[in-house]
Amino acid sequence: MRYRLCLPLAAGLACLPAYAVQYLSVEQVQKLAYPDATAYRAQDVALSLAQMQQVEKLAGLPARSVNWRVFGAYNGDKLLGYLVLDDVIGKFELISYAVALNPDASIRQVEILAYRESHGSEIRLPAWRRQFAGKSASTGGLTLGGGIANISGATLSASHLTDGVRRIAAIAQLVLKP
Amino acid sequence: MIRRAQPWLGTIVDITADCDQAGLNAAFAQIAQVHRLMSFHDPASDIARFNQAATGARLVLNAHTMQVLQLAEQLRLATDGIFNIGCAPRLVENGLLPAPAADAVLYQPAQALMQWAADGALFKLASGWIDVGGIAKGYAVDLAVEALQQAGAQAGCVNAGGDLRVFGQRDWPVSLRHPQQPQRLLPAVPLRDEAMATSATYFSRREQYGRSISALLDGRDGHSILGTSSISIRAPRCVLADALTKVVMASADPHHPALQRWQATALII
C-alpha cells in the first residue's frame, strides 16, 4: 500500500508541469500598472497578530501570511500606488499574480504573472514549487517557446485567486492606506 | 505577440495578440464590462436587476445584456428548453449560486420568463431567476476579439477559462483536457478563425445530500448532467460554441439540429 502511494508521487516529481505560461515579469507588471512611475521602492509588509485578525475580519478569509511583498510606485516623491505580489495554489495550479492598488487602497488592476499546472499532487509539495522560485521571463527559466497551446476544457474556477485578491484588498485597507 | 491574463468571470481570461498593450487593455475592458453587466453575484448587475424585479416589471437593460438574453431565448426555443437560463433556482438549490432573494423561487421549465416590447424594453413574465453563466463567457470572448481587431491586431486568441476564439491567417494549437484526468492534455488541434468551447463535469461534479450534482443542468427538468465525457463545440462565434456545449451534453446528440442552424460541429471525448 505504501508503495502504491509513493510511486506515482515520485513519478510526478520527475515530470515537468503539464502546462506553464509566464505572462509578465515583475519589472513588466510595474511598467504596465504605473507607466508614469520613475521609481519603485520595496515596502514589504509584516503583519502583527492584531493586524492579521483584522484582515481576517475584513476579508472573511484567513490572513495566511505574516509577510507580504509590496512595492510603492513613485513619480519623484509623489506616491502613485502600490503593487502587491502573491502566489495562490488551486486544485492543481499555482498562480503568481500582482495586485496594483491606488494610494487610497482601491484596486486598480490585477495581472497574472505566471500560471503553472501540474500532473497531480506534486503541486502541494514545496520541492515542486521551489523549482519556479525566482524564475521570470527575463531569466528565461520558464519560457516554453513561441507555440504555447491554449487549453479548452471545463471552466476551472479561479476562486483561490479571487480570494487572494480580496485578502490583499483588506491588507491594503489596513496597512497601506494613509 | 504579447500575452496577458487577468481574473474575470470567475475564471482566468488569457489574451494573446499582435498588438500593443493598449489593445490588450481595450480587450480586457470589454471582458470587465460583461463581468459587471452579467454577474449573478453582483447586486448591481443587469442579471441581478432582472432577478430582483417583480413579475410584470418593465426593464431597460444594457444592449449587450439584451443581445445575450435574446440569443438565450432563441436557443431555448430551438432546443425544446434544453438550454434554459432560467435554471438558476436549481443552481441555487444545489449550492452553486447564492440566493438572490430571501424568498425561494421554483424552477418552472416550460415557463417563458421574458418578452420584448416593441421599443426594445424587456418584460419579466413570471417569477424566476436567470443565470447567464453558460453563455456570457463566450459573448465576452467575442467582444474582446472585436476590440483586438479594432486595435489593429492581425492575429490573436482570447481564452476565458476554456471558452476561446482565435483569429488571423494562422493556425492556433489548442489542447483539450482529458475528461477522466483533466490535468492531462490531449494532443493539440489547430484552430483558425473560429471559436471552441468545452463543457464537462470533471471540475464541478460533487455529492450533495447523497446525490450527485454538477454545474451543468438539463433545462428540460433542471437535473444535473452527470455524463463523464467532454463536449467541445467549434463554431464561428464563441457565444454559440459556449451555449451549444450544454445542448449536446444534455441531449447526447452530436448532430442536434441546433448545431447546423448555428454552423457548429461537436466533438465528444
Image (tube, coloured by chain):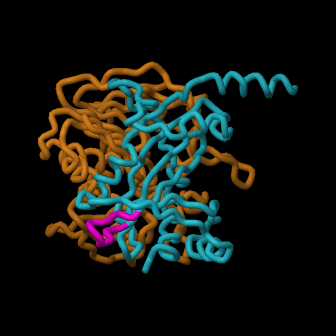
Q: Is residue A79 above or below residue B194?
A: below
Q: Quadrant of the N terminus of chain B?
A: top left
Q: Which residues are magenta?
A: A72-81
The residue most toward the top is B187
Residue at image coords 23%, 66%: B62
Residue at image coords 25%, 69%: B61
Of B176 and B15, which appears nearest the observer?
B15
The picture places residue B78, in percent across and down from the top left corner, at 32, 44
| Residue A28 inside the magenta-drawn segment | no
The picture places residue B222, in percent across and down from the top left corner, at 53, 52
Of A148 and B209, which appears nearest the observer?
A148
| Residue A75 inside the magenta-drawn segment | yes
The residue most toward the front is A76
User: Where, by quadrant of the figure, is residue B49 drawn?
Assistant: bottom left
A159 left or right of A75 in image: right
**Shade of chain B as shown in the rendered figure:** orange
Residue at image coords 24%, 37%: B17
Q: Label the magenta part by its dominant secondary structure.
A: strand
**Residue A43 visible at all:** yes
User: Where, by quadrant of the figure, is residue B96 drawn?
Assistant: bottom right
The residue most toward the right is A1
A7 left or right of B164 in image: right
Of A119 and B130, which appears nearest the observer?
A119
The picture places residue B54, in percent across and down from the top left corner, at 39, 78
A159 left or right of A42 in image: right
**Residue B262 visible at all:** no
The picture places residue A88, in percent across and down from the top left corner, at 56, 50
The residue most toward the bottom is A178
**Shade of chain A as shown in the rendered figure:** cyan
Q: How many marks?
A: 0
